Image (cartoon, rainbow, N blue to C red):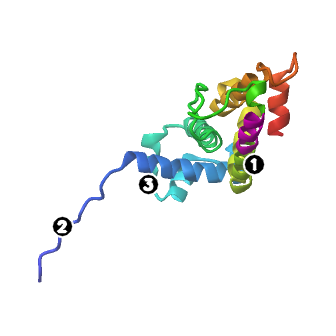
Amino acid sequence: MSPAKPRQRRKRDPESTRISILEAAKTILAQDGAEGLSVSSVAKLAGVNRGTAYQHFQVKEDLVRATLDWVSHQLLDAVFEGWDSEGERPEGFPQPDLEHLPDVIDSMAAFNLRLAEYAIDNPDIGRIWLYDVLSRKNPKEDVFYKRFELALKEMAMSDATKEDLDTEVLAVLMLT
């Protein structure tokens, strides 16, 4: 009888495990809403044991909040590629003034196209994100909405628009 090989332990990768858990939670949230989500069901879908999931998220509410925040950051990264969350414009992005208006329109069109393509390719994220933003007392707590409104506000305060433009209403209309 040959000696048994020692069992090799899997390398731990907490960040990768966390992402797997968040992906699974996103899937369940998109299909069943927060009511259909449990840490156990997410762990099963993510392929991790329940104890591991509870190490990352001790209660369902923490998992839901983390998933919603993660989804918002994914949306922010996809749509505002190259921008930081505080609104610093990427190099080469035109100033919103009359002189640069055609370039600004082209840039905003590209931004809107990325938003539309992302929404079409990721309807689950759109549903989750919209639910979260609509259920908040203050939508500006959401990183994507905050950055989106900031971009519209910058444009509205430029020479390229009319006076008294309500950017919050415009943001809601554009997202709709």
Q: Which mark is residue 49?
A: 3
Q: Do residues under tags 2 and 1 come within 8 Å of each other at their CB atoms?
A: no
**Residue at the farthest top position:** 164
Q: Position of residue 145 (x, y in %)?
A: 70, 31
Question: Is there any visible trace of residue 51 in the rendered image?
Answer: no
Q: Position of residue 142 (x, y in %)?
A: 66, 29
In this rendering, position of residue 30 left or right of residue 62: right
Q: From the viewer's perspective, is residue 129 above or below residue 161?
A: below
Q: Inspect the image, locate mark 3, and give the three-letter code of the amino acid beneath it.
A: Asn
Q: Secondary structure at mark 3?
A: loop
**Residue at the farthest bottom position:** 1
Write the residue at 56% across / 51% down: 23
> On the image, numbered disc 2 is attached to which residue?
6
Quarter of the image with the N terminus is bottom left
Magenta segment's dominant SS is: helix
Q: From the viewer's perspective, is residue 69 above or below residue 122?
A: above
Q: Which stretch did the figure color magenta?
A: 102-111
Q: Do residues under tags 3 and 2 come within 8 Å of each other at their CB atoms?
A: no
| Mark 1 / mark 3, whichever is N-terminal | 3
Closer to the camera in the image, 136 or 115: 115
- Give the mark count: 3
Q: Gap in Å between the C-alphas at discs 2 and 1?
A: 52 Å
> On the image, numbered disc 1 is attached to which residue?
116
Image quarter for residue 176? top right
Image quarter for residue 131? top right
In this rendering, position of residue 135 left or right of residue 8: right
Question: Is there any visible trace of residue 155 in the rendered image?
Answer: yes
Write the residue at 72% across / 23% down: 154
Q: Inspect the image, locate mark 2, and give the three-letter code of the amino acid beneath it.
A: Pro
Q: From the viewer's perspective, is residue 9 above or below residue 40?
A: below
2 vs 1, front mark: 1
Q: Gap in Å between the C-alphas at discs 3 and 2?
A: 22 Å
